[in-house]
Image: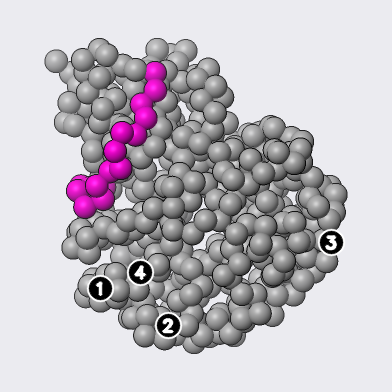
Amino acid sequence: MSKARILLISPTGLDREGNPIVQRKTYLPGLTMPQLAAITPDDFEVTCVSETSEPIPWDEKWDIVGLTGMGGAGVIRAYQIGDEFRKRGAIVVMGGIAISLFDDAMTKPHTDVIIKGEAEDTWPRFLRDYLNDEIKPIYTMEKVPDVTAFPPPSYDKFNAKYYGFWRPVQATRGCPFPCTFCSISEFFKRSYRKRPVDQVIRDVRAAKAHGSKYITFIDDNIGVDFNYCKALWTALIPEKIIWASQCSLQIAKEDEMLQLAYDSGCRILSFGIETVNEESLTHIDKEWNDPKNYGTAFANIKKHGIEISTEMILGLDGDDETVFDRTFKFLMTHKIALPRMYILTPVPGTPMYNQLMEEGRIFDFDFKKYVGGSAVFHPKRMSAQTLQEGYWNLYKRLYSTKNIIKRLKGNPAGLNYFMRLFVFGTNMIYQNHIRRGITPGIV
């Protein structure tokens, strides 16, 4: 008997006209689909597709189509794809962070099965039920998956033709901080789990075997436990990889850890500094960030050879119309190589969404706009229109060719020629996205 065929799709985002965003490569692929493929029994034949760069094989016969959605337009695009494959007779399954947090009533019309929670627990149960013809409409996580028992991701499911040179690996899962806007914190219930170092090294080697030495640790905050990081980064040194990840800014005070990170191959760290406005940090329960010391922190990180990417939020309750010029001056002064910004977006299921709903401040429920580039709520100290226009004008200023060169010129981070070319190329991709009204970083 032939195996049941599964198609796992990472939907792309949508542009401001509502069209799917397509580009030549998926530069920073996610881990969800190769991870799901790895835990799928041999009773099934699995194909993975990243729609951003890879055409969906619409006309092939698929028994199961799995879709993941991070939020906003990605979920809306998943709904569109699900609708089409249901017409074609496939069983459509949807999961992911946004699908888990959104009200099930939003998703049910577009899918046969909803997967809620971490898929290492729910996906195998669904597949067993499929084989036994006992499919349920909703699968809710019954127990937290054991991160020490994950198999290596199926990197062979990546079609190299459609992907850049980075490969994803996960060392830790979750984040312990209580940021009220964050879907990650809500999804993982502020848990933070560390995978065994030897298994992370195993996965790094598997990624290298199917891609390159350039690794993105897709951890939400890799630098929480310095003892764990010390063990992991020491073990990475012989692997001779180049890696990037997200981290909290506390590492800036730890010279030993910064040096070890660099020695292990770290060349870019992304920091969620959120705002230059101290008053706004209270709005998101992130008072431990200290804008007065950002400059000192950045200088020390760069001194150790590591380039900086930042993520910031505009439209917080402490922000008025001066926030745009202040943010521009800050990012230019400190020569931030890869600045990314988002308009505060109340993701359903998060404390921020609940707060703004209770205050009656959300006025737009078109979730295609929930990607960080649209004002869908009433800010406290400016109009929604001012916020949205100021956001895009700020981005256009930051990513003018002249200001890209200013931010990158004379930067002391220890990048080789190839990595400097990568950073410059990423800036140019973001510039193109900004011109098209696409929020940088969503694809």
Residue at horizontal 64%, vertical 42%?
Answer: 353
Q: Distance between the Cα atoms at labels 3 and 1?
A: 45 Å
Most frequent secondary structure within the magenta stretch: loop
Q: Which mark is residue 225?
A: 4
Q: In this view, does 147 lie to the left or right of 287?
A: left
At label 2, the amino acid type is Glu
State the mark number for residue 231. 1
Ranked by sequence position, the earlier of labels 4 and 1 is 4
Question: Dot 2, crowdedness within 10 Å: few (<14), some or many (≥20)?
Answer: some
Where's residue 218, x and y in %?
A: 40, 56
Q: Do the residues labelled 3 and 2 touch (CB within 8 Å)?
A: no
Locate residue 318 relative to residue 209 in the image: left or right: right
Is residue 147 rendered magenta in the image?
yes
Q: Residues within 10 Å of mark 3 (few under 14, many from 20)?
A: some
Which mark is first along the chain, 2 or 3?
2
Specify the label residue 321 is tagged with. Answer: 3
Q: Which one is closest to the eye, mark 4 or mark 1?
A: 4
Q: Is residue 58 above or below residue 25?
A: above
What residue span does the magenta drawing correspond to? 137-153
In the picture provided, is 310 more to the left or to the right than 162? right
Q: At label 4, which amino acid type do we have?
A: Asp
